[in-house]
Image: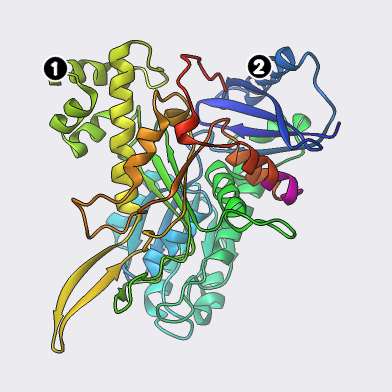
Amino acid sequence: MTAALLIDFGSTYTKLRAIDLDRRCMLGSGQGPSTVASDITIGMQAALAELERRLGALPKFKYRLASSSAAGGLRMITIGLVRELTAEAARQAALGAGAKLVGTFSYRLTAADLENITTLAPDILLLAGGTDGGNSDVILHNARALASSGVSCPLVYAGNRSAADETAGLLAAKTLITTENVMPEFNVLNIEPARAAIRQVFIDRIVHAKGIDRAQAMLDEVLMPTPAAVMEGARLVADGCAGASGLGELLVIDPGGATTDVHSVARGEPATPGVIPRGLPEPRVKRSVEGDLGMRHNAATIVDVAGTDAIARDSGLPARRIAALIGQFTRDVERLPASDDEQRLDQALARAAVRIAVVRHCGSIETVYTVNGPATVQQGKDLSALKTVIGTGGALVHSRDPHAVLRMALADPAEPLSLRPRAPRLLVDRDYLLYACGLLGAVEPEAALELALKHLIPAGDIQHDERTFSA
């Protein structure tokens, strides 16, 4: 047997998946606390011990690959010229690289901005602005401001190439990585080089800063942040690989404890003739992160955004009981639902988080009036014709009814302007393998694709069996 070990150093738990590469199946799983604040090898050893108990003995692994969102994940700040253009392009590059955005700035940095950036203490800062050959004044002003600031993290320069040399001189005392402009021409996105640079900084520097390299003897390498691994898994499942077809354009939804992430692999161009796209072109592979929709850290916010009455109707619980349970969830963010009331509330929270997150991720249409008469314009992606929606993450694994949760991602006749999927098949990543397939795809894409497709289960086929999914 040829085996692989895929590791996720998460913010709460270190999770392992042992894979049989010959049979394209999961051998077993293990889990331990992410002891990144002390010694990350302690949690890794605990996860390996659990995996060994389940398997009887650990096989010899051909690959031992890891991703990480430990210690709060990859904290990033982006700086651009115009909020709707280069600043937005920089934001998309950061999210696509698996970062957790803690701040976005545009135009000329002020003294207050610099103080805010220093307080936010990012792991990486992405500096963009201006098309190639265009405005250099603002990005050079920002480079000078950063040069004299207390910012000590690595900087990635992805702005006007005409200002790259002068910027490098200004920031010579900082750690600077220069890559291609995220917007070389007006309304033209070029975010993949910046994504690659961010991930390389993560591997070269952040892994050491988070203490993850202490576990070096137990793994081969850390390839990328965990959200990027999930995105790469989604890309593989959508596009396939040489000699094997994927499922085509799709949407992946991951309601987690701190955020609800949505990934789409789709062009998203208008599906209806005559509709005019507006705004910055959307990246085909897009990730959005809803930091106010975490199932535990932001449970109270989900209730506020969705409305207490809506959560009460969905859960069948009175408002007073909802408030009491939300207080419990907030005090114990690792708590899994135990009682019937907790399970009903968790289901309602997950349904609300999925609906709101997908509404924000997908595009919308509206009628505007021009000198030539009314016109229909589209902002964002049109995902109405998508054929596949995949759910992953603990909130779906533990759900009484994953199908009911994922159904909230679908188009609603009451919201005709939202371009959500109309009639896709709903699948669940029951064994939390998308991140593992994203990692494995870097070395054996065909095996990773087959593994992923084998473990995606129709949401309606999953029966709640009261078991606790321990990893």
- x, y (%) of residue 286? 46, 57
Query: Label 1's element?
Result: helix
- On residue 320, the disc is 1
Is residue 204 visible to the viewer in this orientation of the structure? yes
Q: Which residue is mark 2?
A: 46
* Secondary element at image label 2: helix
Q: Residue at x 46, y 35 (%)?
A: 459
Asked if residue 70 is positioned above or below residue 141 in the image, the reply reads above
Would you say residue 179 sits in the magenta stretch? Answer: no
Residue depicted at 46% across the width and 54% down the height: 387
Q: In this view of the protein, can residue 223 be seen by the observer? A: no
Say which amino acid is labelled 1: Arg
Q: Amino acid at mark 2?
A: Ala
At a point 36% along the width and 51% down the height, the residue shown is 103
Region in magenta: 443-449
* In the image: residue 68, left or right of residue 392: right
Left or right of 378 in this view: 228? right
What is the x, y in percent for residue 401?
Answer: 39, 27
